[in-house]
Image (tube, rainbow, N blue to C red):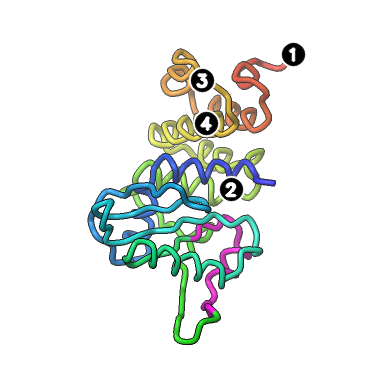
Amino acid sequence: MPSPRYDVLVQLFHDHPQLAVEILRDLMAVDLPFATPTRLDPYDGTLALTLGPPRSPAHAIIVEIPQDTSRTAERLARDAAALWLRLDCDVTVLLVCPDHEIAAHYARPITSGLTGYHFQAQVLGPYGIPDSDLHSPEMWHLEEIMTSATWLAHSPFTRGLEEGRTAGRKEMAARILLLVLATRGLDVPDDTRTRIVSGADLTQLRTWVTRAATAKSVEDVFDEPAT
């Protein structure tokens, strides 16, 4: 069963496909063409993107967020090969793994099962994002989600918000709160969205994020429990 962290990660990449390009190009030094990523639909997986003209893309990216090690390396290699045949362009597979053991499993060299065809996925583990003030807001969001030991009850907001990165951390917390609510299918009215984005301090946002993990309605997030 998908976890809240998995759901939020999937939503983050669907909403911000450029994040996959940023990870590959800036963190992993993968040579990618400079073009706006376009989501490829339909795709039987987390996310597939193309770079370049839609009818003749220069590169494709498969983004997967494995929750365990059940997806075999051979299957990943075959997915990459199938997309290469379909689009006639180079394909990079990016695996985003918040769990150390899962990241280590997929970081191993991969034997595809086909003689002469070698495949290696690009794997981002929980602490694979170096600290930098130049990161995009989405990269900061990803780091916060990835480095949480117990998402969401003792989330990185407990650590990050208390340490305080002032306005930047507050904005990040507000955005992820909205992501959690959207992922759980809770509609957020405009006045509530304004309250989240501009009317809360860091401590309050941390509390709301924790409540959002189990809230049955948006009102449950903001209502103070009866004493």
Which mark identifies residue 177? 4
- Which amino acid, mark 4? Leu
Q: Distance of mark 3 from mark 4, alpha carbons?
A: 11 Å
Span of residues in magenta: 95-112
Q: Viewed as shown, does residue 35 lie left or right of 44? A: left
Q: Nearer the viewer, residue 21 or 113?
A: 113
Q: Position of residue 91 (x, y in %)?
A: 38, 65
Q: Which residue is mark 1?
A: 226
Which of pointers 2 and 1 lies earlier in the amino acid sequence?
2
- Which amino acid, mark 3? Val
x 64%, y 20%: residue: 217
Q: Which residue is mark 3?
A: 188
x 42%, y 45%: residue: 140
Dot in front, 3 or 2: 3
x 43%, y 53%: residue: 48
Which mark identifies residue 148? 2
- Which amino acid, mark 1? Ala
Instruction: Check the image and report above or below for 208 versus 148.
Output: above
In magenta stretch: residue 90: no
x 59%, y 44%: residue: 5
Which of pointers 3 and 4 lies earlier in the amino acid sequence?
4
Q: Quadrant of residue 99?
A: bottom right
- Cβ atoms at labels 4 and 1 below 8 Å apart: no
